[in-house]
Image (cartoon, rainbow, N blue to C red):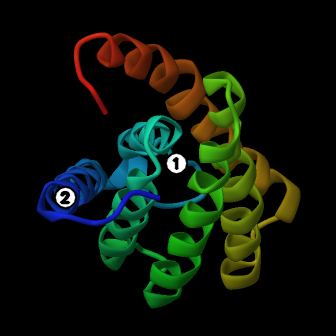
Amino acid sequence: MKKFNAKIIAKIGIVAAIYVVLTVAFPLLSYGQVQFRVSEMLTLLAFFNPIYIWAVTIGTFFANMASTLGPIDIIVGTIATFLAVYPMTKVKNIWIASLFPAIANGIIIGLQLNILFGLPLIPSMAYVAFGELVVVTLIGVPVMKALKKIINF
């Protein structure tokens, strides 16, 4: 991990803020059993640079303050995000890295929905994972690969 300086802290803050805005701006897509959080594309930044582990994790913490699941989602959702983005820094293939948010959020958030609302466990996990696969893998990977050509993450 790089040493934190003003430039890195600014990057973390900007990405965290963008994550919050993209999540809160589209609440019907961002919270609940079926989620298509546009902000989740930003998780792929951790693949390119580990400083973004903190950016997306902090962004999730603040975005989940608006969650319909209540305060528990601030904690559980933030942990799920951290567990999704940290391993992304350890793999060499962006397509494989893009699967971690679907796996972590599918399992953890699906379990949370089951415990809090009694929703069926396996379908809840599948719905959350499906939303992550669509946003992060199918849309996010091509977007980030295109952006990487013009922006140094």
In the shown orientation, is residue 60 left or right of residue 127? left
Mark 2: which amino acid? Ala
Vertical relation: 26 (above or below) 68: above
Mark closer to the chain start, 2 or 1: 2
Q: Closer to the camera, 148 or 56?
A: 148
**Could you tell me which secondary element the residue under label 2 belongs to?**
helix
Query: Residue 67 sits in which quadrant?
Result: bottom left
Residue drawn at point x = 19 percent, y = 58 percent: 17
Measured as percent of width and height from the top left, residue 35 is found at 52, 48
User: Which quadrant holds the C terminus?
Assistant: top left
Return the residue nearer the eye: 93 or 5. Answer: 5
Name the amino acid type tagged 1.
Gln
Q: Which mark is residue 35?
A: 1
In front here: 69 or 17?
17
Where is residue 29? Give x, y as percent.
40, 46
Residue to which mark 2 is pinned? 17
In the image, what residue occupies the spot 31% across and 53% down? 23
Q: Residues within 10 Å of mark 1 (few under 14, many from 20)?
A: some
Which numbered dot is residue 69?
none
Residue 66 shown left or right of residue 141 in the figure? left
